[in-house]
Structures are given as C-alpha cells and as structure tokens.
Amino acid sequence: MDKLNLSEAEWRERLTPVQYHVLREAGTERAFTGDYNSFKGDGIFTCAACGLDLFDSADKYDSGSGWPSFTQPIAPDHVSDHGDDSHGMRRVENRCARCDSHLGHVFPDGPPPTGLRYCINSVSLGFKPR
C-alpha cells in the first residue's frame, strides 16, 4: 500500500482542529460523545484522514466503553499496532497503516471470535454505507 506523507501544514489544512488533535497528536475524544459510538449503519468505516477502509460495521459491537468498538480490522495490513506507555500504563495504539494517523487502542477483552476490542475514536473515522 502506498503511504500518504503530508506536512503538518497540509494535515492542518485537511483536518478540523479536533481531528488534527486526535489523528496527528494522538489525542482522545471524551467517552460517549462521538458520532459513531451508538451508530448502527451498515457499511465500511474509513480513516477520516486518508479514506483507507479500516473496519466493517459487521465487526462493530457495543462494548460500553463510550467509543466505537470493533473485533477486528477489515484487513490485517490496514491498521498498525504500536506500543504506548503514556498515561502510566502499557497499551497498544492503533494507527492507520496508510497515513500513520492515530485511531485508538486495542485491548484483549473483546468478544469472540478474536477476543479483541479495537477501541476507536469516532473523529478518526469516516463511513461509507454499503
């Protein structure tokens, strides 16, 4: 997959201030405030920064965490994992594999079939109806 490398000025022009904070500075939106937390649409969730397909709505579930949660990415090479030792804990950060934008974190407390919970910021996502 071709990488998308933009300057910080280009990212600021492309994204809203909230999107820039979350996607480019690894910020987090407040729990239960995102547009996609309770969203039930059928389709594909994409990266809000570059449009890469990230998650299928068939893999979305209500984790009760306050953020959209998924059991797996749409393809293993579309979401990359990175160690995150911020906030005094060890977590696994998820980023878009194309543009390296912060999406959220993955935790080992999800339902079958994967046992994973991809906890993703709504502002990091776009949506394409099926």
Image (cartoon, rainbow, N blue to C red):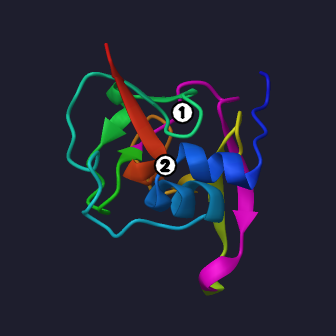
Q: Residue at x 30, y 42 (%)?
A: 61
The part of the image, by quadrant, that contains residue 1 is top right
**Is there a contact, CB below 8 Å, between mark 2 and mark 1?**
yes
Q: Secondary structure at mark 2?
A: strand
- Dot 2 surroundings within 10 Å: few (below 14), some, or many (20 or more)? many
The magenta region covers: 70-87
Identity of the amino acid at label 2?
A: Tyr
From the top left corner, tell me how far across and down residue 112 is, in percent: 41, 39
Question: Is residue 101 in view from this perspective?
Answer: no
From the top left corner, tell me how far across and down residue 103 is, in percent: 55, 51
Residue 73 is tagged as: 1
From the top left corner, tell me how far across and down residue 77 is, in percent: 70, 29
Number of marks: 2
Image check: 100 left or right of 119? Answer: right
Image check: 69 left or right of 61? Answer: right
The part of the image, by quadrant, that contains residue 56 is top left
User: Relative to 88, is 26 above or below?
Assistant: above
- Dot 1 surroundings within 10 Å: few (below 14), some, or many (20 or more)? some
Q: Residue at x 60, y 53 (%)?
A: 12
Residue 86 forms part of the magenta stretch: yes
Residue labelled with disc 2: 118
Seen from the viewer's position, the closer of residues 124 and 84 is 124
